[in-house]
Amino acid sequence: MASPIGHSLAGFFGFFLVRENAESLKYYSSKKLIITAIIVANLPDVDFILGYLIYQDFNALHLQFTYSFFVGFIVCIIIYFCLRFYKKITYFFLVWLWGLYFSHILLDMLAYDSNPPAGVQCFFPFTADYFAFPISILGGLTFTGGIIQLKNFLIVLQEVIVIPLLSYVVLLIVKKLKKDEIINN
């Protein structure tokens, strides 16, 4: 799985990806949007807290239902409607929230997972199967022997390089799609 630093980076770059390309978000506080982006990008890891509260084991529920595209969408709808009472926001904001949540699932599917069953339950409640990409581009964190160790430090360094590159590729795709949309209209 990716580290909280990696997920926070994804949220941070998700903010800039949308901030530059979305008229509907240009009028909101950058500070609040960055904080929202980072929180939502880390939200699937709430399963650590739930696992501890229910089973006194942080890993009891990890990579399960909170990693579902469906559950993520429901969570984002709840966040969207809660925030809608606070300030008028567009449906684009809902799509953005779900994209941030999805980034967490995607990064963990791209990370090496040595604990069986490997992968995440991304299609829960439709199936309880675990899914992962066949090729890992991110290393997986190790918690045996403590979290502070050289291997985890190197994995975080890898994320600091890979995640901005992935974000840049997504930005190029978005710009290309936007350019094609302008040309076709």
Image (spheres, rainbow, N blue to C red):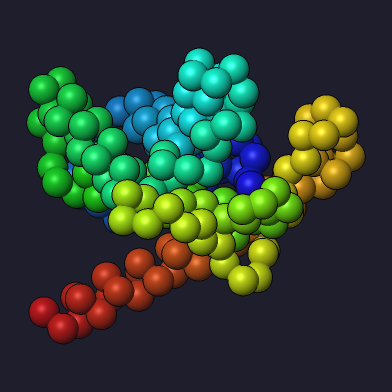
**Residue under the point 57% across and 55% down:** 119
x and y percent of residue 147 in the render? 79, 30
Q: Is residue 135 left or right of residue 80?
A: right
**Residue under the point 11% across and 79% down:** 185
Q: Determine the image quadrant of residue 150.
A: top right
Q: Is residue 80 left or right of residue 108?
A: left
Residue 47 appears anywhere in the view: yes
**Nearest the eye: 83 or 70:** 70
User: Is 145 situated above or below 169?
Assistant: above
**Nearest the eye: 155 or 45:** 45
Q: Is residue 11 left or right of residue 184?
A: right
Q: Is residue 89 left or right of residue 150?
A: left
x and y percent of residue 44 in the render? 45, 37
**Residue under the point 85% across and 44% down:** 151
**Residue under the point 31% across and 43% down:** 71
**Nearest the eye: 158 or 33:** 158
User: Is 158 situated above or below 184?
Assistant: above
x and y percent of residue 35 in the render? 42, 28
Residue 163 appears anywhere in the view: no
